[in-house]
Image (tube, helix red, strand yellow):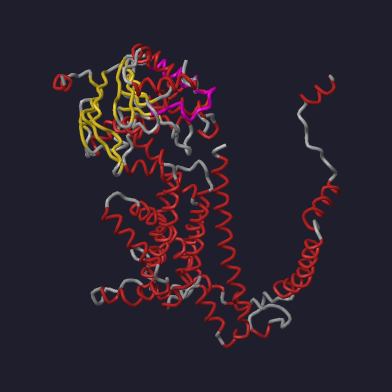
Amino acid sequence: MISKAKSDPALMVRIEQLNKWFGNAHVLKNISLNVEAGEKVVICGPSGSGKSTLIRCINQLEQHQQGTVEVLGEELNGSVKGLERIRRQVGMCFQHFNLFPHLTVLKNCTLAQTSNLGVPQDQAIERALSLLDKVKMRDHANKFPSQLSGGQQQRIAIARALCMQPKVMLFDEPTSALDPEMIAEVLEVMTSLAHEGMTMICVTHEMGFARKVADRIVFMDQGEIVEEAPPERFFSAPESPRTQRFLSQIINHGVHAQ
Amino acid sequence: MTAMNQALTLPLAPPRLPWTRRALTWTRSQLFPSAGHSLLTLGVIALLCWCVPAALNWLVFDATFVGEHARDCNPAGACWLPITQRWNLFVYGFYPQAEQWRVTLSFVLAGSAFGLLFFKRLDRRLLLAYLALLPIVMWWLLKGGAGLPEVSSTRFAGMLVTVFLGTAGMIFALPLGILLALGRRSKLPVVRLLCVLYIELVRSVPVISLLFMASLMIQLFLPPGSAFDILLRVQLVLILFTAAYMAETLRGGLQNLPRGQYEAAQALGFGYWKTMGQIILPQVLKQSIAPLLTQFIGLFKETTLVMIVGVLDIVGIAMSTAVTPEWVEYGHEIYVFLAIYFFVICFALSRYARHLEQRMEQSRS
């Protein structure tokens, strides 16, 4: 199974027996997860379950101590040059957007293209504008991030990541820092991205989005993958009692449920 | 009801009083809000009435600006003759008369660096190239060689020394400070250790002792005969000293920047130097304009310490003027002039930094 996966060119991310510690705290325990091209995987779980740490290991914002992380067929270890090359093909959206406040929206979208991919300025601008158009932010191209709302900033952050023409997109709780009325506009952009066939790995509490878009839902608790299932089965017939408890909490509070 | 609705929809302009009323309100609320305040206001006004006219009389109205000798001075006012008579010495030091255009030119070049920074649309690379070349060109102009007759640096004195040390010091200290700050936060333990050692060592030694070291000790380590210009040696000390303090200022800025900025840059595939140069430093430098300027002003004032190791800067010239038999009575005027000279330059620098800060605010809203 594993050796077959290794040679599988459709495999975007392969994680095997991943272990990570923060000091003495064992935050990721024997995680194994494969993501195929075009697949949409939603990772959910209570806070502190290690889901953000896991997704951050995929582009090595966190370094793991044990196990294998392979992205686009290349194993990620200490080598910096290889890492930068991989990161350019893996887009990431953060909870707090992390736009560059000293640059205009347009420049936020073009800088990495021109500086890291060597795209000529005019092409970079063209690509940035068409992607800003897609997230409905083209009219704001010359503003600075501080002049925009959270939802607008997050859509720009998605466009900025897409400008690098990534093969995989990572979303680390992209709607958690947003006011309720702005969550929808960001989810809409993410949904349309999913329909276009982008490979996506999302850490999110938006169960409505997960049900509608995900091919597979991964439930984590205390650093372990507890359950992995397609959405219908995950929501209707969760196997583990921990998953059941999590789902009942989320649905009882009703905030994120559909 | 309709009238009320109308009133609600109309944008309300703030009520505008005639200026006399506004002046009166302002005076009452700002100058005489309470008995204690009123007393303080009256006290300050009395103090100003007492000393401002006297000072102006002494400095300007009764003062002597034209004349040649001490006997031309009006004893009731200040006598600026020691300065006007020795103006050439104050500005050019002992620089040969025929070559003084070189000093003037280097002043103009240094001054226009500030002028250039006012042009928004100027290509940044051009500006950086100008700033990088400026100290080298200034040194070549002053010192000579390569086509220009050489002038010994023992003839350098006065404003020439102050301006050269100040300008070149500012231009070199900032990049060095940036490198030290980055080094101090580096992941490589050797680099970090060296930077910490350097910064802590320099910061815990008074600048005067560093200057003495530069003037006396460096010669011991150099092979005999290879005299390293004293002016360059003190310049080096001033740069190294200021850079250590700047590094600490910038380190604070680097630490305060949210971690998300570093992470976003990494996630987009920026390498270390690109992350620093394009994402992190532009933000940190913008935030640090005010404290960096304080250090620039400090550096400019510290150039006066070079007098101690025998380089005659403008203070040196002033002191030697104050002990010449003819002008020995006019020490007050000479030192007042010095104070005005330093105040004008430092105040201009601080206004300039204020202007930069405001311009950056504007460009973001």
Q: Quick check: is A210 in the magenta stretch?
A: no
Please identify the quadrant where the N terminus of chain A is shown.
top left
- Image coordinates for residue B138, horizontal then vertical, percent: 42, 61
- Image coordinates for residue B41, horizontal then vertical, percent: 78, 63
Q: Nearer the viewer, residue A48 or A211?
A: A48
User: Can residue B43 be seen by looking at this rendering?
Assistant: yes
Horizontal side of B352 relative to B270 (left or right) equals: right
Q: Is residue B239 above or below residue B250?
A: below
Q: Is residue B346 above or below residue B288?
A: below
Horizontal side of B45 relative to A90 (left or right) equals: right
Q: Nearer the viewer, residue B137 or B189?
A: B189
Instruction: Name the residue rendered at 38%, 59% in the picture.
Output: B136
Q: Which residues are magenta?
A: A171-193
Instruction: Name the residue rendered at 49%, 19% in the picture.
Output: A254
* Residue found at the very far left of the displayed protein: A3
- Image coordinates for residue B31, horizontal then vertical, percent: 78, 58
Judged by its main secondary structure, the magenta piece is helix
Instruction: Name the residue rendered at 45%, 55% in the picture.
Output: B249
For residue B143, which quarter of the picture?
Answer: bottom left
- Image coordinates for residue B285, horizontal then vertical, percent: 46, 49
Q: Is residue B28 above or below residue B276?
A: below
Q: Is residue B128 above or below residue B76?
A: above
Q: How many marks?
A: 0
Horizontal side of B307 relative to A195 (left or right) equals: right
* Residue found at the very far front of the displayed protein: A241
Horizontal side of B82 relative to B254 (left or right) equals: right
Instruction: Name the residue rendered at 46%, 44% in the picture.
Output: B283
For residue A114, which quarter of the picture?
Answer: top left
For residue B347, which quarter of the picture?
Answer: bottom right
User: Can residue A107 be seen by looking at this rendering?
Assistant: no
